[in-house]
Amino acid sequence: MKHQLTVWYDGACPLCLREIALMRRLDRRDTIEFVDVTRSAAENCPIDQAQLLERFHASEDGKLLSGAEAFAAMWRAIPLLRPLGLLARNRRVLQALELLYTLFLRHRPKLQQWVARRK
């Protein structure tokens, strides 16, 4: 089956690896192509690799999305999470999710260290 969505993620991030492992398990229809930015050649990246590592990115219908919008696209591709992804099409819901994502990004380095120590 042809992938309907491409997701770029940070394969060096323990938080990202856990999240992507869960999404792979939930993607039973194999509709998402997961691309580890840390292992992907530059020509396979739609933008600079450093930019891809700063925020979560996905490509839906040829449109590059980032942050909460990218997560919502991924959720829409997974039947179990589709209602949440559809809800995020509401501008206010998406703004709230983006605010939460931005807050997460501020604390991401500390959370990465914490997760890495727990291994």
Image: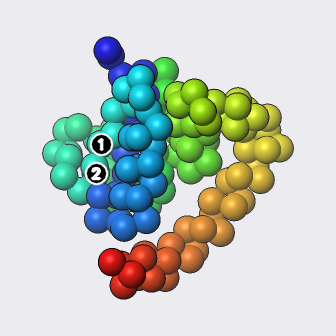
**In terms of secondary structure, where does tag 1 sit?**
strand
Q: Residue furthest top?
A: 1
What whole-number distance in Å separates the C-alpha atoms at marks 1 and 2?
6 Å
Whether residue 76 is visible, yes or no, is no
Residue 35 badge: 1
Residue 24 in the image: x percent, y percent? 39, 40
Residue 105 badge: none
Residue 35 appears in which quarter of the rendering? top left
* Residue lying at 49% horizontally and 21% vertically, measured from the top left: 61
Would residue 93 be found to the left or right of residue 35 on screen? right
* Residue lying at 66% horizontally and 35% vertically, measured from the top left: 85
User: Which residue is at the front of the view, 119 or 67?
Assistant: 119
Whether residue 75 is visible, yes or no, is yes
**In terms of secondary structure, where does tag 2 sit?**
loop
What is the three-letter code of the residue carrying label 1? Val
* Crowd tier of the residue under label 2, counting other residues whose Cα lies within 10 Å: few below 14, some 14–19, many 20 or above: many
Name the quarter where the C terminus is drawn. bottom left
Kindly indicate whether the residue at mark 2 contacts the one at mark 1 (C-beta within 8 angstroms): yes
Looking at the image, residue 104 lies above or below residue 2: below
User: Which residue is at the front of the view, 80 or 73?
Assistant: 80
What is the three-letter code of the residue carrying label 2? Val
User: Which residue is at the front of the view, 47 or 87?
Assistant: 87
Residue 49 in the image: x percent, y percent? 30, 53
Residue 7 appears in which quarter of the rendering? top left
Looking at the image, residue 12 lies above or below residue 66: below
Residue 18 in the image: x percent, y percent? 41, 59
Residue 8 appears in which quarter of the rendering? top left
Residue 37 badge: 2
* Crowd tier of the residue under label 1, counting other residues whose Cα lies within 10 Å: few below 14, some 14–19, many 20 or above: some
